[in-house]
Amino acid sequence: MTKGEIAKINFQNGCNCAQAVLLAFCEDYGMDRDTALMVAASFGSGMGGLRETCGTVTGANMVIGLAKGKNRAEANRCFREFAERFRAKNGSLVCRELLAIRVKTRLTCADLCEDAGNLLKEILSR
């Protein structure tokens, strides 16, 4: 099962979007699931339900911090690559904009979690 599939299932099983993505990777980088759930709890639905930065994006950034945080320049480079590629594929990094776009594309938040998980895995595997 891919990291994206795991993230999608996490979302479908009740996690918010940030939790879904972080949970797919947390144990790979030494964070237990309960801590990951708590850390990402207020980042879903565009950060606390404000519909700002998409939770899949903030969750991905948390994963990048776990994976690359000892080297801030490398962490920033990885996040910029993630953000650029996610925006190019999905049209935005902003929750409210993605919600509007999905009316046309029929992508769900679960699909965005899957996309974020797969993209992260690709970026972090290099």
Image (spheres, grey):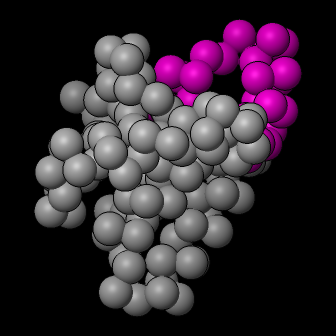
Which one is in front, 88 or 112? Answer: 112
Q: Quadrant of residue 33?
A: top left
- The percent coordinates of residue 88 (x first, y second) are 75, 47
Q: Along the horizontal axis of the image, is 111 left or right of 8? A: right
**Magenta region, mostly helix, strand or loop?**
helix
Q: In this view, does 103 lie above or below 68?
A: above
Q: Give the range drawn in magenta.
A: 90-114
Q: Is residue 1 above or below residue 123?
A: above
Q: Along the horizontal axis of the image, is 6 left or right of 63? A: left
- The percent coordinates of residue 72 (x first, y second) are 48, 87
- Specify whether residue 5 is in view: no
Q: Along the horizontal axis of the image, is 89 left or right of 1? A: right
Q: Does the magenta stretch include residue 107?
A: yes
Q: Which residue is drawn at 32% across and 68% down?
A: 66
Which one is in front, 114 or 11? Answer: 11
- The percent coordinates of residue 44 (x first, y second) are 55, 36
Q: Quadrant of residue 100?
A: top right
The quarter of the picture where the C terminus appears is bottom left
